[in-house]
Image: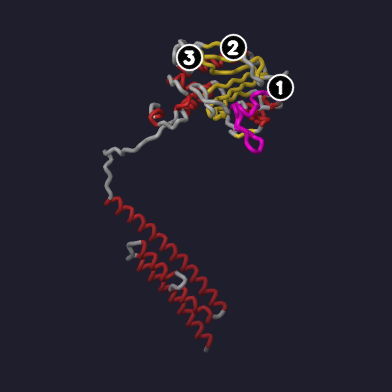
Amino acid sequence: MEKAFQTLFAMSIFKQIEDLKNKAEEQIQKIQTQTELDQLHSSILGKKGELTSILKGLKDLSDQERREAGSAANETRKEMDLLFGNAKKQIESLEIQQRISKEKYDALKPIETAQGHLHPVTAVQYQVEDIFSSMGFRVMDGPEVETDDNNFGKLNFSEDHPARDMQDTFWTEDGNLLRTHTSSVQVRAMEKLSPPFRIIAPGRVFRYEETDASHENTFYQVEGMLIDRVVSVSNLIYIMKTFLSAFFERDVKVRLRPGYFPFVEPGFELDIHCLLCSGKGCPVCKQSGWLELLPCGLVHPNVIRAGGMDPSEWQGFAFGMGLMRLVMMKYSIEDIRHFLSGNLRFLKQF
């Protein structure tokens, strides 16, 4: 008698589950908003919903009937979850269509917004990168806070070199420094790349010095380096003239003077005929008619050796130029301090 009662009770649970599924299908068809759908889902499948109430009766069934009823309930829950999921997608689609039908947009009316643009130094940096990339140079970067060894030691600066002096360099409390030139990327390039290679490295550098029309304590440079088996001064001059002609889009008068830099031997100062005053003399060129633009030379054997290469097998040239001075020559700007002044009237000209 008791077993027959359990069987009837199990059949009743199966029917309740089936009826609940049919009820859900019927009511879902009538729902038009997400709020109503959420409420129905909670009342049927929630923790305190109807399915949970039905399953409380499983405790009165035999083990076999409990497993069968539980399996049927889980299968029904999956089917109802699918029903609710499909209904949610339909409601969302309907709401979008209703919103589109109500909203209007005049495509002919222009939207007036303030647009920014590249800083002139950034724009010129991209141009420099494009020109050198066309000649096979790879663009590299390095940290602005450098070690003494990368900034000076591996570039053949002696321990008593004036550039190490506090009056020229910003030092940090941990013994590092704000790089004084992008030449430190030469060191990183030699450590990372296998020769032969050619790279340029644009970036910000820092010098502890007074500012004037042609000097800043924070400014931008671009470093260049080429390493190969046979490299001469004529290779250096050819690359520099090719770059300057492409950048200024005209022939530029230059001169090469002997210069001393610890990381090159021989070293040179490549000067450009001042384009602001056409050589007549101005504050930027210090009334000389020439602007010091491009220190360069053949890479010193000690630097090549510090980079892990044999100087009897590998040679190279290196150069560095001020990006800001390139901008000044290109756009006839008379004072380098304009670039970091934050003066929007000045920047909006470019």
Residues rendered magenta in the picture:
160-182
- How many angstroms separate mark 1 from mark 3 (CA)? 34 Å
Q: In terms of secondary structure, where does tag 1 sit? A: helix
Residue 128 x, y percent position in the rendering: 50, 23
Residue 185 visible somewhere in the drawing: no
Q: Is residue 178 magenta?
A: yes
Image quadrant for the C terminus? top left
Q: Is residue 173 magenta?
A: yes
Q: In terms of secondary structure, where does tag 3 sit? A: loop
Indicate whether 121 appears above or below 258. Answer: below
Determine whether label 1 and label 3 are within 8 Å by CB.
no
Indicate whether 239 appears above or below 150. Answer: above
Residue 163 x, y percent position in the rendering: 64, 25
Closer to the chain start, of discs 2 and 1, is 2
Quadrant of the rendered image containing residue 276? top left
Colour style of the rendered protein structure: secondary structure
The residue lying at 34 percent from left, 62 percent from top is: 33
Q: Residue furthest bottom?
A: 1
The residue lying at 53 percent from left, 87 percent from top is: 2
Q: In terms of secondary structure, where does tag 2 sit? A: strand
Quadrant of the rendered image containing residue 137? top right
Q: Residues within 10 Å of mark 2 (few under 14, many from 20)?
A: few
Closer to the chain start, of discs 2 and 3, is 2
- How many angstroms separate mark 2 from mark 1 (CA)? 23 Å
Numbered label attached to residue 302:
1
Towards the viewer: 19 or 156: 156
Closer to the chain start, of discs 1 and 3, is 3
- How many angstroms separate mark 2 from mark 3 (CA)? 16 Å
**Residue with the mark numbered 2:** 257
**Residue with the mark numbered 3:** 274
Q: Residues within 10 Å of mark 1 (few under 14, many from 20)?
A: some
Residue 192 x, y percent position in the rendering: 65, 31
